[in-house]
Amino acid sequence: MSKYITTPIYYVNGEAHIGHAYTTFIADTLTRYEKLKGEDTYFLTGTDEHGQKIEESAQKNGKPTQEFADEISASFKNLWDEFEISYDQFIRTTDEKHKRGVQKAFEVMYAKGDIYKDFYEGHYCVSCETFFPETQLIDGGFCPDCGRSTTVLKEESYFFRLSKYEDALLNHYAQNPDFILPRSRANEVVNFVKGGLRDLSVTRTSFTWGVKMPESLNDDKHVMYVWLDALLNYITALGYGNDNEKMNYWPASTQFVGKDILRFHAIYWPAFLMSLDLPLPKTIGAHGWWTRDGEKMSKSKGNVISPKEVSDAYGVENLRYFMLREVPFGQDGDFSQRAFIDRINSELSNDLGNLLNRIIGMSGKYSAFEIDSVDVKKFHEKELNAMNIVLDSLDTFIENLQTHRYLEELWRLFAIGNKAIEEHAPWVKMKEGKKDEALATVALVANILAKASIMLSPVMPKTTNIIADALNFTINNASYKELILDKNLLKVFTIKAVPPLFPRVEEPLMQEAPLATPNAQELKVPKTAEIVKEEKVEEDNLIEIGQFFATSLKVGTIVEAEEVPKSKKLLRLQVDLGEGRNRQVLAGIKEFYSAESLVNTQVCVVANLKPAKLMGMVSEGMLLAAKDTEGLSLIRPEKPKKAGTPIG
Ligand code: ME8
């Protein structure tokens, strides 16, 4: 059976960060693994380019929307090309073929009676491109997913009869326990559906940057809801609604998503497919988040790490290994250079790199680099059995998407090799005149390395090719069959020396980038280059008085203040802005002010910032402060003013 593997299509509102790289690395690894096994595999990735969020990002950047989308989409594609991601297709939702496919799907659902026209009134979060019922809003107005403020929209809209598919979905989850992996994530989806599904608004009239309605509906006031448009990419890429050329790959075998978009993929997507009478994907694999100081890394928060920067410093294959090994699939992980360096030094350099160097060295001394497996079975049956048990166990781990367990088990092979060398001490055997035994140990380890490199190749394709080259074989489906499935040993060959594959890393190779969350950004001491850049921006970019007044500055009285546990920088303040309720403001000023000293003092607050979440808490404003080399000082009114007094 053929395999079809997908990543989410990434929004073009900012460049890729390591969260996107992670999803793409896992999908690439699984694709390479399936291809190694000889499966006919198709791998799709791409970019999601419609919707209000993209329109707004383009405006902010002063570019026409399509031009902006072209640039960011190309930056994703170029990065994946530089990383040698083995995708078969890079889809863009602005591709004409995709748009036609979406229109076709809309027509099919409409003809079936699954789409109807009505009115929608609700709270809409532009950042998440989602409506939320009032009961789900935080403090009556803020988005439950991202904490930003929502806007009330009343629109004529087409609706998809999601409610109709409630039972069918529940049935599908019950009968297909691997539909959502890890299985622990399935409960939240099941509970959400059991809570009742409302029909889904699938068109918008408030903006125009989207796929147009099918001509047959003759209703060009509407454009498609971005999630309907985006989800359908997985079939339009295969020619749905056009030539159906690659529809033989459908249903997908594994669709990778971050847990943030599991609901869309495990509820809406299968319901759309049922409506189109298409089979459902076998598995939706939902991984956790890469965080920074405990917060999800995201383009809109600006706290991201660039995959290019990391790969330039540490190498892309080391990065792939680290990301897949460090975090159990489905769980969150904090990106730490320390942890990364530890894994490079101990697992890659010591366990793998040194083992290879040791046998190259020994075979050079004992047998002029010739390696012969002829006596391996005789002297190392125990090790061969242990090795085969490990090799046989690996498939289950990767098929269950447990990449960390896969690599952990794979590393047992190197432990078997290292232990065999210690126990059998070939240098002693040589002195005792037992050359055949010494050479058998060296050959055992060469075989372990060969088999391990085949299985490691989906994660580290280039590095393992170098190892295979040293061991005089090629990693491909034929060698997979020969050495892994048939459990054969290497034929006689001459081993080659290799350049150091994993140089030890003594100290961090990247400067720890400053956190760019709103508060921290405000408080950051600019480096000289930044000052120059900012001054230049000021010169080139004078603002109108109206732009200044777009910022609502107010006097606030701090009513309560406390430290945020586990945060070096943050204080949590309750600030009275004369609104009848206090605002919670998280301010990065802990190093400069004690919580007690702030209570009952006045500050200047930016009062109309979109709320942001810091360390899981909503912050609804920002304090003005000045910082130089001597420290930070809050900006306060010269004389006390009534809370809420406007500044300007
Ligand atoms: O959601 N940690 O696009 P997007 C791990 N266009 N993975 C992360 C991550 C993080 N901190 N941040 C992002 C969209 N990702 C939609 C998808 S699909 C039909 C439409 C990864 O650019 C993760 O895979 O916000 C997440 O699901 C995806 O990027 C979201 O990318």
Image (cartoon, rainbow, N blue to C red):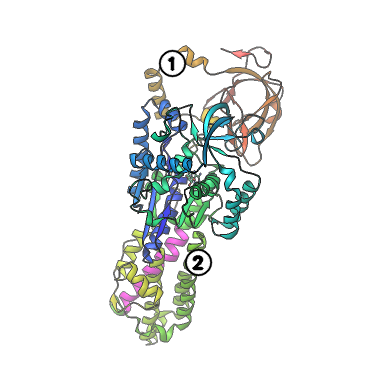
| Residue bearing mark 2 | 396
SS at badge 1 = loop
Would residue 44 appear left or right of 385 to someone viewing this image?
left
Q: Can you say whether 198 is above or below 368 in the image?
A: above
Give the dominant element type of the magenta stretch: helix, strand or loop: helix
- Residue at 47%, 12% in the rendered image: 545
In which quadrant is the N terminus drawn?
Answer: bottom left
Identify the image quadrant of residue 78: top left
- Say if the magenta span includes residue 365: yes
Q: Which span of residues is magenta-colored? A: 344-366
Dot 1 amino acid type: Ile
Dot 2 amino acid type: Thr
Would residue 558 appear left or right of 528 to someone viewing this image?
right
Number of numbered discs present? Answer: 2
Q: Position of residue 342 (x, y in %)?
A: 49, 56
Q: Is mark 1 within 8 Å of ligand 1?
A: no
| Residue bearing mark 1 | 543
In which quadrant is the C terminus drawn?
Answer: top right
C-alpha separation, residue under disc 1 versus residue under disc 2: 60 Å
Does the image show residue 590? Answer: no
